[in-house]
Image (spheres, helix red, strand yellow):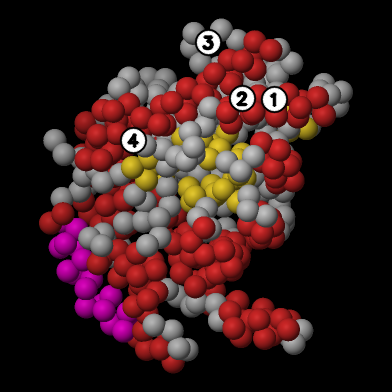
């Protein structure tokens, strides 16, 4: 039984909404034309946007307290790919998947690559995992992995990362993302400088195993599970390590991995300026690393991040190509719906940033006209580009309204019948 949604159902859904969408699109096109902007160019731009879906995102997430699984959750990486295929089928904005090892470790990597290709998907960065112990593992990561005091633990963590690179090569990935939760819960528990020296020593070995056309992304995170001093806690440490390691090492910005009120768009500008912005894990946050749906709490911040990315793209041209990935935890929603919505919200910020009148902004900045400079950004942010996003999807074969189309398709009911719950099964962690 096929698990992707029938193309006829998508076409029928779009046909029902076609007249309404065209009217909204024409109205927006007229308004943008008066501003000197061509809606067709913006629609093409939207069609070129892509953000990777995390394999771990299609299962229900959870907190430190509990996980409440949903119906029809994928039980293995092949079923995860089916869900990712639906997300891309309806949004046409998520053609790639970011895998996480060992959760997604295939017995036959080529079979997995073929499965992805059959769904029109490919693989983005692969993620290593040295923040939990696996069955049968010799050394424990309880007291750290790449930074551990024990040489045996560090060697095991390095070997795992190199294995991820080898798997990624077979799967067609071009990057490894490394996040370590290593750190201390007590003052004095670690020698702060010594831990970072050991991290660099381990990362040099991983870096040496990277193929010529690969990157390694260093993901920083302020806290958790280490609550006193996380070794790679901030972008400054990440930048220093990426610089130390070499040109293939870059920094990955997970929006949720910062203190509340941190100016993330400025971090993005700094990393872009110095050629070290490798990519993103998009999500949203209210308090800490909440991993809420992208754009659900602070869409203006997301827009300001893309405003910096648009500026960097103008300055650096085609050479500027950070990787975009979602990284969220879906605790109370259908993960497929959350991921579709989130992909659209990130795409929305991308298109809104393209609406910024950069010539006018430069003049206001030169004139020290702070109020009008801010209004120039707000003007773009306040423009509802939904008809552009919907038209981009429909023209590419996606759904005018992905969530409505998904619900009408009965996909969740269908897979719930095919995927009976498996006791104790959970590989839906988030990083
Ligand atoms: Mn992340």
Give the CA separation, mark 2 to mark 4.
31 Å
367 sits to left or right of 407:
right
> Is mark 4 in CB contact (under 8 Å) with mark 1?
no
Residue tagged 4: 80
> Is mark 1 in CB contact (under 8 Å) with mark 2?
yes
146 lies above or below 92: above
- Residue depicted at 63% across the width and 53% down the height: 275
Q: Earlier in the sequence, mark 4 or mark 3?
A: 4
Q: Position of residue 195 (x, y in %)?
A: 77, 25
Q: Quadrant of the N terminus?
A: top left
Give the CA separation, mark 4 to mark 1.
35 Å
Q: Quadrant of residue 28?
A: bottom left
User: Which region of the structure is painted magenta?
Assistant: 9-26
Category of crowding for the residue at label 4, using alpha-carbon neighbours closer than 10 angstroms: few (below 14), some (14–19), many (at least 20): many
Q: Residue 137 shows which numbered tag? A: 3
Q: Position of residue 5 (x, y in %)?
A: 20, 48
Category of crowding for the residue at label 3, using alpha-carbon neighbours closer than 10 angstroms: few (below 14), some (14–19), many (at least 20): few
Residue tagged 2: 205
Which circle, 2 or 3, is nearer the viewer?
Answer: 2
Q: Quadrant of the C terminus?
A: top right
Q: Secondary structure at mark 3?
A: loop
């Amino acid at each position: 039984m096929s698990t992707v949604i029938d193309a006829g159902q998508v076409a029928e859904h779009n046909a029902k909404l076609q007249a309404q969408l065209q009217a909204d699109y024409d109205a927006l096109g007229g308004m943008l034309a008066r501003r000197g902007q061509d809606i067709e160019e913006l629609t093409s731009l939207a069609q070129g946007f892509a953000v990777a879906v995390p394999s771990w995102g299609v299962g229900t997430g959870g907190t430190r307290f509990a996980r409440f699984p949903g119906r029809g959750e994928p039980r293995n990486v092949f079923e995860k790919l089916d869900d990712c295929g639906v997300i891309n089928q309806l949004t046409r904005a998520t053609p790639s998947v970011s895998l996480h090892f060992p959760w997604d470790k295939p017995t036959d990597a080529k079979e997995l690559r073929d499965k992805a290709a059959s769904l029109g998907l490919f693989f983005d960065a692969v993620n290593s995992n040295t923040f939990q112990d696996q069955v049968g593992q010799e050394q424990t990561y309880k007291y750290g992995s790449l930074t551990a005091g024990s040489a045996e633990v560090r060697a095991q963590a390095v070997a795992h990362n190199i294995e991820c690179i080898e798997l990624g090569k077979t799967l067609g990935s071009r990057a490894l993302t490394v996040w370590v939760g290593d750190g201390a819960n007590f003052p004095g528990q670690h020698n702060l400088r010594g831990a970072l020296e050991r991290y660099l020593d381990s990362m040099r070995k991983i870096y040496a195993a990277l193929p010529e056309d690969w990157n390694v992304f260093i993901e920083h995170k302020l806290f958790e599970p280490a609550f006193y001093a996380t070794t790679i806690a901030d972008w400054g440490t990440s930048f220093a390590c990426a610089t130390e390691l070499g040109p293939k090492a870059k920094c990955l910005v997970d929006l949720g991995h910062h203190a509340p009120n941190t100016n993330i768009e400025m971090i993005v500008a700094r990393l872009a300026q110095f050629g070290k912005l490798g990519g993103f894990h998009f999500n949203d946050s209210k308090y800490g690393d909440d991993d809420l749906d992208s754009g659900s709490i602070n869409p203006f911040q997301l827009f300001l991040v893309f405003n910096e990315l648009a500026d960097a793209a103008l300055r650096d041209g085609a050479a500027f190509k950070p990787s975009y990935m979602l990284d969220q935890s879906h605790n109370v929603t259908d993960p497929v719906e959350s991921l579709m919505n989130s992909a659209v919200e990130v795409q929305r910020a991308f298109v809104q940033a393209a609406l910024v009148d950069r010539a006018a902004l430069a003049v206001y900045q030169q004139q020290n006209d702070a109020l009008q400079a801010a209004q120039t950004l707000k003007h773009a942010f306040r423009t509802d580009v939904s008809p552009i996003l919907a038209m981009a999807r429909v023209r590419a074969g996606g759904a005018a309204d992905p969530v409505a189309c998904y619900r009408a398709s009965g996909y969740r009911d269908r897979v719930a019948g095919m995927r009976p719950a498996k006791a104790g099964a959970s590989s839906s962690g988030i990083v």
